[in-house]
Image: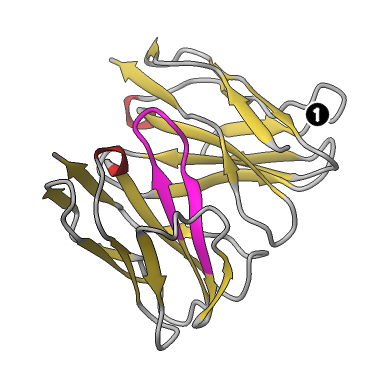
Amino acid sequence: EAEVAQSPRYKITEKSQAVAFWCDPISGHATLYWYRQILGQGPELLVQFQDESVVDDSQLPKDRFSAERLKGVDSTLKIQPAELGDSAMYLCASSLLSGLDEQYFGPGTRLTVT
Amino acid sequence: GNSVTQMEGPVTLSEEAFLTINCTYTATGYPSLFWYVQYPGEGLQLLLKATKADDKGSNKGFEATYRKETTSFHLEKGSVQVSDSAVYFCALKFGANNLFFGTGTRLTVIP
């Protein structure tokens, strides 16, 4: 069964350092999402891509976060510089055609900033 | 704005007990409603959904009914198993817009 792949699964970094996460959606899925899940809370959308275009990044802290999906397939989320408050689980999800379709989630990357 | 309020956990039940996890929402209009489940070490999985009032979503013995009058979507299961131990998230969505999640409820089922 096809799955959303994410790496790394765990990342520990010091504050002020740069960190990057990678996501490979299910093959053929046009829509890709990055969510942040702070411990004890539900996931919150950071950015949504339709193919290679950003369709919603209203909740992305653009002073330090960036996301790209250059060829409309896999995606990278970057934080620079990392802050203590960025410690969270970063989830990637994909859906077939649009936001109307079911979202399939990857296992997430757990980030700890020290 | 849109929000989802879930019953706080953790919830601990004995095997074969009846489960209810409460979920209420605040929204302008009539969203689609979802329950997602997150098993240890895994990503979120869609458990069930309902797209309009009075719809009942069901899957793997779990059920939830979309109640417009009480703005609720409570999750129920008649007889839980140890394998149901997980974190359950209630969520809402309008059309193609993004999902709004509740804070999650951790369920532990003991033999």
Residue linked to disc 1: B67
Q: Is residue B57 above or below residue A10?
A: above
Q: Which residues are magenta?
A: A34-48
Seen from the viewer's position, the closer of residues A70 and B74 is: A70
Seen from the viewer's position, the closer of residues A19 and B31 is: A19
Residue A2, given in percent of the width and then of the height, sits at 37, 70
In terms of secondary structure, what is the magenta stretch mainly?
A: strand
Quadrant for residue B12, please give it.
top left
Q: Give the residue at the far bottom of this rendering.
A: A71
Quick check: is B23 in the magenta stretch? no
Residue at the spot 66% in from the left edge and 33% down from the top edge = B3
Residue B107, given in percent of the width and then of the height, sits at 40, 22
Badge 1 sits on which subunit?
A: B
Residue B56, given in percent of the width and then of the height, sits at 74, 38
Q: Is residue B6 left or right of residue A74?
A: right
Residue at the spot 19% in from the left edge and 42% down from the top edge = A112
Q: Is residue B104 above or below residue A56?
A: above
Residue at the spot 47% in from the left edge and 32% down from the top edge = B88
Q: Is residue B12 above or below residue B2?
A: above
As shown in the figure, which amino acid type bears the numbered disc 1? Arg
Q: Is residue A4 left or right of residue B72?
A: left
